[in-house]
Amino acid sequence: MTEATIGVIGGSGLYEMEGLTDLREHDISTPFGKPSDPIVVGTLLGKRVAFLPRHGHGHRILPGEINVRANIYALKVLGVERIIAVNACGSMKEEIGVSHVVIPDQIIDRTKGRTSTFFGNGLAVHISFAEPFCPHLSSVLHDAAVKAGATVHMGGTYVCIEGPRFSTKAESELHRQWGVDVIGMTAMPEAVLAREAEICYASLALSTDYDVWHETEAPVTADMVAQTIEKNVETARRAIREAIPLIPADRDCGCASALSVAIQTARDRIPGRVKRELGPLLDKYVD
């Protein structure tokens, strides 16, 4: 089905999408279980948009508990081709101030126990991930965030940690030595699973704090993050509204054909159960 071609995954504080009309709620079951919440599809500025709060309404799901496979699979079933991800993050550089927006173009995955692929169980797939964020959608988000009045940094490396705790000072200093720009807990495995599903994925990473490295700023706490989130959520909403009209109907990026050279298993050796379960991802490549 094609209910919506644009998806929005809301981060901390963004539990509903204002301005949607003609709403339909989809309570979808997937081979991987239930998504974080029912997905709400509505019309925004003439386009159908699917909205999913990553942590569930009431922020009840920790980063490591998010059923990311179910979230991405459900959005794929609804016809989503592009995902705008809203990610709260900590700044790792002086010039990235609190409430600034970063549109990252690279990622370092330091998560530990999260399942980061749809595949396996008799199907070997090795996805290309040199550019983990769709450059075309990222460019749209940059322009939209500028129009929304935000201070925007185009490009940068997002280091994704396991959480739910914040960093030690030693970890924060190590990440700064690596040259990362922001630190968060939610962009992985979202980005890679979206690529496996051939969905364009880009992030509005909104800074809430300076992690624990800054000499004159207090180390990050949950209370500190909460105080900044409300302002950041309004920035995200404005940027998303600006982005929707800028997204073209057609895609000419590599995200749309990511599986075309990634499937290694001989087609006649792929288990039938895997073909059935992953039909929304595989049907155009596997009979």
Image (cartoon, helix red, strand yellow):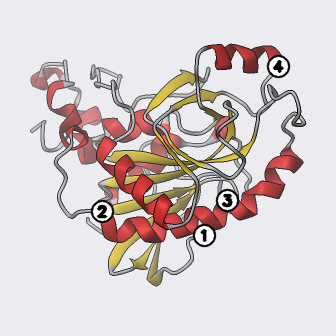
Q: Quadrant of residue 81?
A: bottom left
Image quadrant holding the C terminus, namely: top left
Q: Which mark is residue 232?
A: 3
Query: Sequence order check: which comes first, mark 3 or mark 2?
Result: 3
Residue denoted by label 2: 247
Query: Which residue appears farthest toward the front when viewing the image?
Result: 95
Q: Establish if 226 lies above or below 48.
A: above
Q: Establish if 169 lies above or below 184.
A: above
Residue denoted by label 4: 169
Residue denoted by label 1: 16
Q: Nearer the viewer, mark 4 or mark 1?
A: 4
Image quadrant holding the N terminus, namely: bottom left
* Kind of residue sitting beneath label 2: Ile
User: Residues under labels 3 and 2: Cα distance?
Assistant: 22 Å
Q: Nearer the viewer, mark 1 or mark 3?
A: 3
| SS assignment at label 3 | helix
| SS assignment at label 2 | loop
Say whether residue 202 is left or right of residue 180: left
Residue 108 at x, y = what percent?
Answer: 52, 23
Query: Sequence order check: which comes first, mark 1 or mark 3?
Result: 1
Q: Which mark is residue 254?
A: none
Q: Residue at x 74, y 16 (%)?
A: 173
Q: Residue at x 32, y 46 (%)?
A: 200
The reply to whether residue 177 is in sight is: yes
The reply to whether residue 14 is in sight is: no
Query: Sequence order check: which comes first, mark 2 or mark 4?
Result: 4
Q: Residues within 10 Å of mark 2 (few under 14, many from 20)?
A: some
User: Residues under labels 2 and 4: Cα distance?
Assistant: 40 Å
* Kind of residue sitting beneath label 1: Glu
